[in-house]
Amino acid sequence: MADGKNFIEDIIEEEISEGGRCYGKAVHTRFPPEPNGYLHIGHAKALEIDFGMAEKYGGLCNLRMDDTNPTKEDEEFVDAIKEDIKWLGHNWDDRFFYASDYFDKMYEYAIELIKKGLAYVCELTPEQMKEMRGDTQTPAQSPYRDRPIEESLDLFRRMRDGEFEDGKMTLRAKIDLASGNFNMRDPVIYRINRLPHHRQGTKWVIYPMYDFAHPIEDALEGITHSLCSLEFEAHRPLYDWVVNNISIECKPRQIEFARLGITNTVLSKRKLRNLIENGYVTGWDDPRMPTLCGLRRRGYTPAAIRAFHERNGVSKVNSLVDFAFLEYCLREDLNKTAKRAMAVLDPVKLIIDNYPDGQTEEFTVENNPENPDDGVRTVSFSKELWIEREDFMEVPAKKYFRLFPGNEVRLKSAYIVKCVGCDKDADGNVTAVHCELDKDSRGGNPADGRKIKSTIHWVDSKTAIDAEIRLYDKLFTTEQPDLADCNYLDFINPESLTVITGAKVEKSLESTQPADRFQFLRVGYFCADNKDSKPGHLVFNRAVSLKDSYKPEN
Ligand code: ATP
Ligand code: MG
């Protein structure tokens, strides 16, 4: 990567240059999700590579639903997958396909292999087959391996016509029982399965296996580079065997890259579905989920997700990335793009004793100091404000520089005030803090230039709006909840969600639309919930806290 290119780019550039395999051709990739769940941040890595390579080299990327498995697939997932990919900013135009649309052709290619003596119908039970393929000992040949071609052709047609029970027979490729690669030991390429298919209904009772179907799908679509994750590496010889032994012109090249893993979460559709079914989260789009719809609802931006993948790079070594790095990328983006606002999460009244009753004034404040184009807004100010309860201490701790009797603080963009005491209820809880305002400090700067150590945020109690705030934390308490020998459900963080109902936010947020993002000064980055927030009942999700000690290495 000395020249800043990853290994896939090196391969592609070599192949499209003069004399290369793809010289004069457009680079053509595909993203092939199985529509049995929602896309997660790991899929985003794959699709950023698939669409990214096509975009970089002026080529094309197909979106293909890999729906050769008759179980579980669902149109709800198809629509969600499309929405998520569009959200990330990618486009497939009219190149949207279903692998199941190729079932007829796959069947024909299977017939071709049988006719060439390269496939046979086998009647071993799965257990017998497993044993004979030699998981541990030397492989033994199936007694059906050398049956006449005509017999296999006849049986395969009858398999298709539904004459045999599920599991009774399979079609196997005749490759190499002595191969050191288990995948080449006469793999099953078709099986009988009577489950109905989400698009094909009951037309088929035989279904192609992934290793046979995938190379055919790629070749039929003219894919030049079939990019996939590392677990398919050992399947590549079989991929090549299939495209080289059927009559098809296109010979795509499979290239594998490392899977993405992230700390404190799980990235498997099955496990994510389990979290939903067991009620640990509210759905695929729960803001704690590593799904793209969950991250979007939480407040993640496409730019942050793309930056995350770009900076992680593409390699051949599986890695576990710190969730904090994803958060870092979001913070970097929102710092530039999110408008600032004031919100008080745990409010207590601040009463300005020397401010006239009934008087109001307005301050003009910047929406985003990082982006002057975001303009300004006005915030109102009056005798009673809301401040954070933690910004007052009757008896200050060491190094506490906020409000305590006798101390001065700056009310952000407004005035300097000096604390003069507090009110308490019978139980000793502080019910209001009292202060006096320095009239010569309008705008927040003292006339005599004296140093004010702390600035706190506030909201005018006359105009404040109530809001519900949802604070999210890690979904799992351990970095790798899905290590082989442990049960990830044992590590669910019971405190992954804290709901605050009585927060006070400034009036300008009245018109907040679902999915609007803000930096609440001193508190964090928040996003209006895209399902539950509406005018009159604002709900903000904490996307990410303001600061973290995390520093990326690159
Ligand atoms: P899961 O284990 O979450 O169900 P999958 O691999 O079965 O994932 P597919 O829908 O088949 O899900 O995945 C589509 C593409 O996304 C595949 O090419 C797959 O290799 C890739 N992919 C899935 N998870 C990751 C990951 N964590 N990192 C990189 N690529 C991934
Ligand atoms: Mg898969």
Image (cartoon, rainbow, N blue to C red):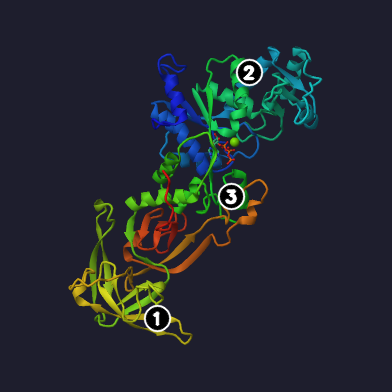
Q: Which mark is residue 109?
A: 2
Q: Is residue 520 above or below residue 129?
A: below
Image quadrant where one finds the C terminus: top left
Residue type indicated by callout 2? Tyr
Q: Residues within 10 Å of mark 3 (few under 14, many from 20)?
A: some
Residue sitting nearer the eye, 478 or 33: 478
x and y percent of residue 334 in the render? Answer: 36, 52
Left or right position of 254 against 53 = right
Q: Secondary structure at mark 2?
A: helix
x and y percent of residue 140 in the render? Answer: 79, 23
Question: What residue lies at 46% left-to-right and 84% top-to-bottom?
Answer: 428
Q: Is residue 392 above or below residue 527?
A: below
Q: Choose the circle earlier in sequence order: 1 or 3.
A: 1
| Residue ID for mark 1 | 394
To which quarter of the image does residue 368 belong?
bottom left
Q: Residues within 10 Å of mark 2 (few under 14, many from 20)?
A: some
Look at discs 2 and 3 and give the one toward the viewer.
Answer: 3
Q: Which mark is residue 500?
A: none
Q: Choose the circle earlier in sequence order: 2 or 1.
A: 2
Q: Secondary structure at mark 3?
A: loop
Report ligand 1 position as a quadrant.
top right
Q: Secondary structure at mark 1?
A: loop
Question: What residue lies at 68% left-to-right and 48% top-to-bottom?
Answer: 485
Q: Which mark is residue 480?
A: 3
Question: What residue lies at 38% left-to-right and 54% top-to-bottom?
Answer: 516
Residue type indicated by callout 3? Gln
Q: Is residue 526 above or below residue 246?
A: below
